[in-house]
Image (cartoon, grey):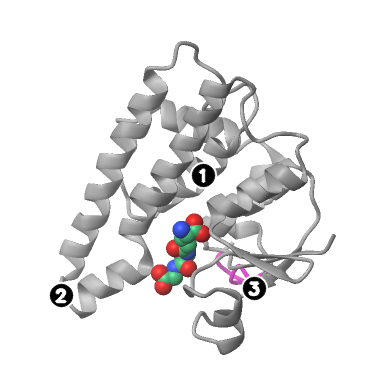
Amino acid sequence: MRLRLHTRCQNSAGQRVRIVLNLKGVAYEYVAIPSLRNDAFRELSPHGLMPVLEVDGHAVVQSLAIVELLEELFPEPSVLPVEPIARAEARAFANAIACDLHQLNNHRVRRYLAEELSADEHETIAWYRHWIARSFAGLEASLARRPQEHRFCFASQPTMADAFLVPQMDNARRFDRDLSPYPRLCAKDAACRKLDAFIAAAPETQPDYPDGSR
Ligand SMILES: N[C@@H](CCC(=O)N[C@@H](CS)C(=O)NCC(=O)O)C(=O)O
């Protein structure tokens, strides 16, 4: 099977997919996207968003759908907990990041705020931090109410929840968000960052990471 991942080093939705590919030990070709406006890329990605995973020439979009596809194609090791309720909780956690938080703070949303609604830099950053704070409080609470604490979010090994959390923590840090109110998120993030699968998926280890910023 030929897998080609169209992404960029700073593409956090793509980083989720890179982590899951690495956790599963699946080899893939890294294709750095030159431009989102490029016709060839728009054919692969109808919404013009990264990442896209080509599976034997079939273009699959949306990181959640891609991760679920990888779980079906390569079931072992699984990126879901064993127990059904915990599986639903891990999926819900990933959904809360991908659907409820990340989209509000996406580059195109911030560009619209600035260019069309004339928000200044201070207002755009306030917007960004507001949605991080709202979402991270919910994510922290969803871990706090679990009957058992694990090293990773929902199990003793990383699941898709961790693969979605780590890039989002990077995004929050990029906007200088104080993460001390979220000790569980910080602990899970720190545990993940020690693993090769996460290190190899990080922005700074990608082939298109700009020289000199390493
Ligand atoms: N829901 C999509 C989101 C994809 C997405 O928003 N990707 C961002 C980069 S992390 C993007 O392509 N942004 C381009 C833009 O905002 O113009 C997914 O999970 O794959």
- Image: magenta residue range: 208-213
Q: Is residue 184 left or right of residue 17?
A: left
The residue drawn where x is 51% and y is 79% is: 36
Q: Position of residue 86 (x, y in %)?
A: 53, 23
Q: Earlier in the sequence, mark 2 or mark 3?
A: 3
Residue at the disc numbered 1: 164
Secondary structure at badge 2 equals loop
Residue at the disc numbered 3: 32
Q: CA distance from mark 2 to mark 3?
A: 31 Å
Secondary structure at badge 1 equals helix
Q: Earlier in the sequence, mark 3 or mark 1?
A: 3
The answer to whether residue 134 is magenta is: no
**Residue in front for this viewpoint, 17 or 176:** 17
Count of residue discs: 3
Q: Is residue 140 left or right of residue 213?
A: left
Look at the numbered discs 2 and 3 and tell me whether their residues touch, using CB distance below 8 Å: no
Q: Amino acid at mark 2?
A: Leu
Q: Is residue 152 above or below residue 28?
A: above
Q: CA distance from mark 3 to mark 1?
A: 20 Å
The mark found on residue 117 in the picture is 2
**Residue in front for this viewpoint, 15 or 39:** 39
The residue drawn where x is 58% and y is 68% is: 8
The answer to whether residue 210 is magenta is: yes
Can residue 87 be seen by looking at this rendering?
A: yes
Considering every residue shown, the one lying at the far top of the view is 147
Q: Position of residue 135 (x, y in %)?
A: 31, 41
Residues packed near mark 1 inside 10 Å, few (<14), some (14 to 19) or many (20 plus): many
Front label number (3 vs 1): 1
**Quadrant in which the C terminus is drawn:** bottom right
Residues packed near mark 2 inside 10 Å, few (<14), some (14 to 19) or many (20 plus): few
Characterize the magenta stretch by its predominant secondary structure.
Answer: loop
The residue drawn where x is 55% and y is 18% is: 150
